[in-house]
Image (spheres, grey):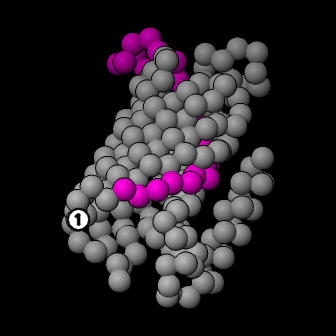
Amino acid sequence: MKTIIIASIFLISVMGISQSDGKNEQFTFKSFSFSPSIYFNSSNTGIALSGDISYAYNKSIYTFSAIAGGVVCGDFFGSCNSESFGQINILYGRELMLTKKIVIDVHAGLGYFSYKSSSIIGTESGHSTTVGFPLTTKLRFKTGNRFSIGLQLHANINSVNTIYAAGILFQWNRKSF
């Protein structure tokens, strides 16, 4: 599954880079962003960092994202489970212009989800992987043609441990024509 996702990201990235700038009917680079976040699930709260790169074709947005996070508990935090997670996702989305400066991006897709926790019993070293269904929403405030700042909400629904995250979004956009 990892190989298929990585190969897909590579091939679509190459296709996007090889396209020349021009009409909106082409597959073109749209933006890249990162978001430091707070995540939570059924047992813990921790920190996460996500990054993505997006391409546009007509009004559709195709996004490749990677997210990693975790929490490590010690004596200071009391009793809790150490855990970490990682995910690689391919998403399809649309951009909704609320005003000239406020934009909402909505994405849904499919991805690889890896979870490691000290509370998982019966698996190799507390590690489990599965297919996840990521959902991402970005509320962006455009500060100019190339930069947006805002709020990113993310969920990964899967059979191991559903993760929710909220964080500040920093996004660099392709220059508008």
Instruction: Name the residue rendered at 36%, 56% in the picture.
Output: 96
Task: Residue 49 in the image: state x and y as whole percent.
Answer: 44, 46
- Circle 1 packing at 10 Å, graded few (<14), some (14-19), many (20+), is few
Task: Residue 97 in the image: state x and y as whole percent.
Answer: 31, 59
Using the image as rendered, state which of residue 108 and residue 10 is in the foreground: 108
State the quadrant of the C terminus: bottom left
Residue 35 vertical position relative to residue 162 in the rendered view, above or below: below
| Furthest residue in direction top, as rendered | 79
Using the image as rendered, state which of residue 110 and residue 163 is in the foreground: 110
Instruction: Name the residue rendered at 46%, 32% in the picture.
Output: 164
Residue 125 vertical position relative to residue 132 in the rendered view, above or below: above
Residue that badge 1 annotates: 100
Which quadrant of the view contains residue 128? top right
Task: Residue 176 in the image: state x and y as whole percent.
Answer: 34, 78
Provide the secondary structure element on which disc 1 rests: loop
Magenta part of the chain: 74-96
In this rendering, does residue 139 appear at all?
yes
In this rendering, does residue 49 appear at all?
no
Residue 113 highlighted magenta (yes or no): no
Instruction: Name the residue rendered at 72%, 25% in the picture.
Output: 125
Would residue 45 appear left or right of 91 to someone viewing this image?
Answer: left
Residue 84 highlighted magenta (yes or no): yes
Which quadrant of the view contains residue 122? top right
Would residue 170 appear left or right of 128 to someone viewing this image?
Answer: left
Residue 24 vertical position relative to residue 8 in the rendered view, above or below: below
Using the image as rendered, state which of residue 143 and residue 6 is in the foreground: 143
Task: Residue 158 in the image: state x and y as whole percent.
Answer: 63, 30
Kind of residue sitting beneath label 1: Lys
Instruction: Name the residue rendered at 50%, 84% in the picture.
Output: 23
